[in-house]
Amino acid sequence: MAWPGPEPSRTTPGGPGARRCCAGSGASRPGRSPAPCPSAGPGPGSTSPAWLGRPTPRAPPGSHASQRRTWWCSPARVPCTTARAGVERIAHLVQLAAAGGTPVVAVGQGIGPIADPAVAATAKAALDHLSGLGVRERWGSVPTLAALGVAADRWAVTGDDALQVAIDAPRSASARRGLGVSLRANRASAAPERLPELVAGAIGAALPGTPLELLTMMESASVSDRALLERVRPAGEPERSTSELDVPAALAAIDRCRLVVTGTYHAAVFALGLGIPVIGLAGSDYYRQKLHGALEEFGPSAGVVLDARSPLLADELADALRTWWGRAPEVGPELEAAARRQAGAAAAYFADHA
């Protein structure tokens, strides 16, 4: 979960004996269907957050919360209208489980950025009930945890769980010749309207003729990565964008790339896990934390994050493309080693709390 970013989270399990539970309504991604959630009367779905001021809710006898050994929370999305509503849902569920004596462990989390004091208080209430917390990056999450007063012995930096998917992905024997592009335009990203055209211009100036891999990481009624990417694709070039629900195809497309330009988080994580450097494009504090945080865990060989709203973006991106296209082959082994280190830390944290 990225508390309390504009893409709130669904809680899902991991580990033997854990219970799958969704902190909101709506459809899950394939293979991650939620089981029914416990209920304890009025909660975060109500119009008033007054339940937060009541004593921690009691888990009904015989409910999931009182029966299960451990609940595992991993990153995803909960359909709700505001960041505060998402945090309230998670806080209510975590408190409910804790009231039933069920430990709750959250893994692969991004914490913050938090500007609203009410959201900070709600997040702190949930974090205080966790039995374990694995955060995916230290660039933004660690300062946020310190500001919330969460003791350093209550959490560990483990990297992103999705790295293991990239590490386990098959590698092509062919040379990496493509340039991956992944863009996002929604309220959370604050990307400028002309971002696709700026990216296309920078690519044409720095790496003309380079084959593009257009990476669709989200498609919904309100967010269409594919529509943005079509504005990057050169006229006359056949469509080769990936599907958000086809992770193996996305990994295979990224594996054909020497470098990835991305405004989306998971395109960066998958690329870095495959040993491919990244040029991040961030237009908001939320995405700055996500992208800077991901790259920092891989060290200075991971790439660079640019300000997507900079008036000099076209020139800055062209310069970065030339630099990192040249450096890409030499940094691959270092990035893959960093991915394995993070995956090992995540596995060890899981084992310690299972």
Image (cartoon, grey):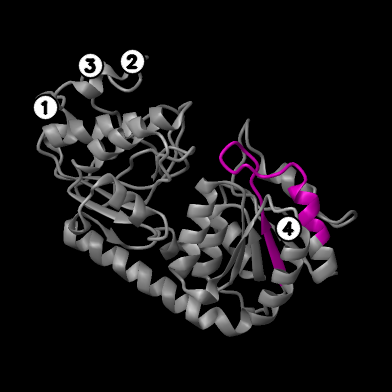
On-image quarter of the C terminus = bottom left
Instruction: Tell which circle, 1 or 3, labels the residue nearer the N-terminal end.
Output: 3
Q: Amino acid at mark 1?
A: Gly
> Whole-Å distance between the Cαs marked 1 and 3?
16 Å
Which label sits in the foreground, 2 or 1? 2
Residue at x 36%, y 74% (from the top left corner): 341
Residue for badge 2 = 48
Q: Amino acid at mark 4?
A: Leu
Secondary element type, mark 4: helix
The tag on residue 313 is 4
Give the vertical position of 106 relative to 333 (above or below).
Answer: above
> Whole-Å distance between the Cαs marked 4 and 2?
43 Å
> Whole-Å distance between the Cαs marked 2 and 3?
13 Å
Secondary element type, mark 3: loop
Instruction: Give the class, few, some or many, for how many residues have Cα within 10 Å of label 1's Cα (few <14, many ≥20).
Output: few
**Stretch of the chain drawn in magenta:** 178-201
Instruction: Tell which circle, 3 or 4, labels the residue nearer the N-terminal end.
Output: 3
Give the vertical position of 266 relative to 301 (above or below).
Answer: above
Residue 76, located in which quarter of the rendered image? top left
Instruction: Give the class, few, some or many, for how many residues have Cα within 10 Å of label 2's Cα (few <14, many ≥20).
Output: few
Residue 155, located in which quarter of the rendered image? bottom left
Residue for badge 3 = 41
Nearer to the camera, 269 or 322? 322
Residue for badge 1 = 62
Secondary element type, mark 1: loop
Secondary element type, mark 2: loop
> Whole-Å distance between the Cαs marked 4 and 1?
57 Å
> Whole-Å distance between the Cαs marked 2 and 1?
28 Å
Q: Give the residue at the far bottom of this rendering.
A: 330
